[in-house]
Amino acid sequence: MNLTGNDLKQIGFIEGKALGLALDLVEKQYTDLPFDDKLALLKQVVNNPTSFINDATLAPVAAELLRPLDDTIALNVDGKSYQIYGADAIEQGALQQMETAMKLPVTVAGALMPDAHQGYGLPIGGVLATNNAVIPYGVGVDIGCRMCMTIYDIPTDKLQEKKEDFKKLLVNNTKFGQATFKKPKDHEIFERKEFSELQIVREMKDRAWQQIGSSGGGNHFVEFGIVEISNTINECNLAPGQYLAVLSHSGSRGLGANIARHYTKVAMDKCKLPQEAKHLAWLDLNTEEGQEYWLAMNLAGDYASACHHQIHERMAIGLRETPLAMIENHHNFAWKEKDANGNEIIVHRKGATPAGKGVLGIIPGSMATPGFIVRGKGLAESINSASHGAGRTMSRTKAKQTILQGHVNKFLKEAGVELIGSGLDEAPMAYKDIHQVMNYQKELVEVLGSFMPKIVRMCGDEKFQEVD
DNA sequence: ATGTCC
């Protein structure tokens, strides 16, 4: 009696090349062996292929059983098309990364914002919509990085008159980089169940406690400046005119960075992709890991918001005023949204401002150029998004090597900006022209007002700090 | 972005 594929499956073979080879060889080479003995022999092979690796007859079966399964997920040959805003000013590397992202089998749609530049996996300024999958590096390392602005009924000439007081307010009430408050303010976020239920979040709770209310390094800042409202903002009862405002840019600190690092590793382990796409590994939202990441990401987003609120609370106390309005938005995050047909999509915005119809947002320029308060127009092609800033025109390394401190000082002086901290890598010249970037995204957002920085604090960098 | 490699 001849063996069948089903007999082999009974003893542990799975559908595939090894099964076919075994069936073929055993019937040709062991014609005289009784059915039961053939089955017993193949059972030994499938249970311990290593001991048959030099077997005169069955070596090919053993080799096939031992070959690691190629579980690499293939990219689609043709990537989906996507809209680019301001293509002329976007570096090649960012375009290539976006093209790779558009080939993922889970990708539904994409768009590239005019401040785009190369990042890890998805470019900064990249927007990617997927079907029931979340890509940790599609959100970015600084989960929930966001902008927050409070607007005050305080005459703007106070900024010049009381400049030293405002500087002191920033120096005494903001912390950047490694620095944290000696006595951090408590916050209800620490009661969230994610801090006890998710291991990586639990491990970060003490550090999150230490860091709450602090700001990050790099391009993060807290600044006083002048808001010029040009179009009435009914959403927050703001009439056209000049206002004093506080603007902050910061993220989820060590908490978000460690959540991102952990779940990117999990995703890359579970979801093998070709080399050029490996950082785009995703987590299926129906899996436990996917659901864990979603909860952890949302917690990191709320934590980032809590940090901003404490920053603005300290400023409000220092100013002895209550703000007229507060505007804030994430720009490194993933959201469950609906496409034009009403289907749920997962929209990753990695350095992109949500710009759904009527949605308020803030797009900063640089330390000495204006930023803008915007209202989204909800353009489908942009996946309801806009840029999250001017975008770099120079890498941090290049900026540090080529920009002169004297040149920056002159630029700041001419713009009437007082700067505390920062390094040359954040110099205004390292960024694209914000006006041109706004021009590229006219269809995406309506500009309601501008914000001109006046007293800016960023993370200090000893190497470039003046000692006075 | 990040005690910038547990």
Image (cartoon, rainbow, N blue to C red):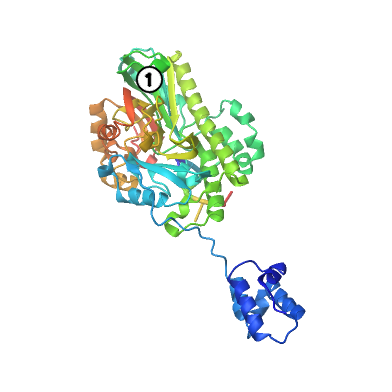
Residue at figure coordinates x 67%, y 78% from the top left? A51
Q: Quadrant of residue A20?
A: bottom right
Residue A263 is at least partly visible in this image: yes
Which chain letter matches label 1? A
Instruction: Say which amino acid is labelled 1.
Output: Ala
Quarter of the image with the C terminus of chain A in it: top left
- Position of residue A130 relative to residue A411, above or below, is below
Is A76 placed left or right of A156 in the picture? Answer: right
Residue A58 is at least partly visible in this image: no
Q: Nearer the viewer, residue A237 or A336?
A: A336
Q: Nearer the viewer, residue A145 or A170?
A: A145
Image mark count: 1
Q: 10 Å neighbourhood of mark 1: few (<14), some, or many (≥20)?
A: many
Q: Which residue position holds label 1?
A: A245
Quarter of the image with the N terminus of chain A in it: bottom right
**Residue A231 picture location, percent across and down:** 31, 18
**Residue A34 picture location, percent across and down:** 75, 83
Q: Nearer the viewer, residue A436 or A466?
A: A436
Instruction: Find the residue positioned furthest to the front.
Output: A1
Q: In which quarter of the image is residue A422?
A: top left
Is A138 placed left or right of A410 in the picture? Answer: right
**Residue A298 picture location, percent across and down:** 54, 35
**Residue A66 picture location, percent across and down:** 61, 71
**SS at badge 1:** strand
Residue at figure coordinates x 47%, y 37% from the top left? A333
- Position of residue A427 relative to residue A66, above or below, is above
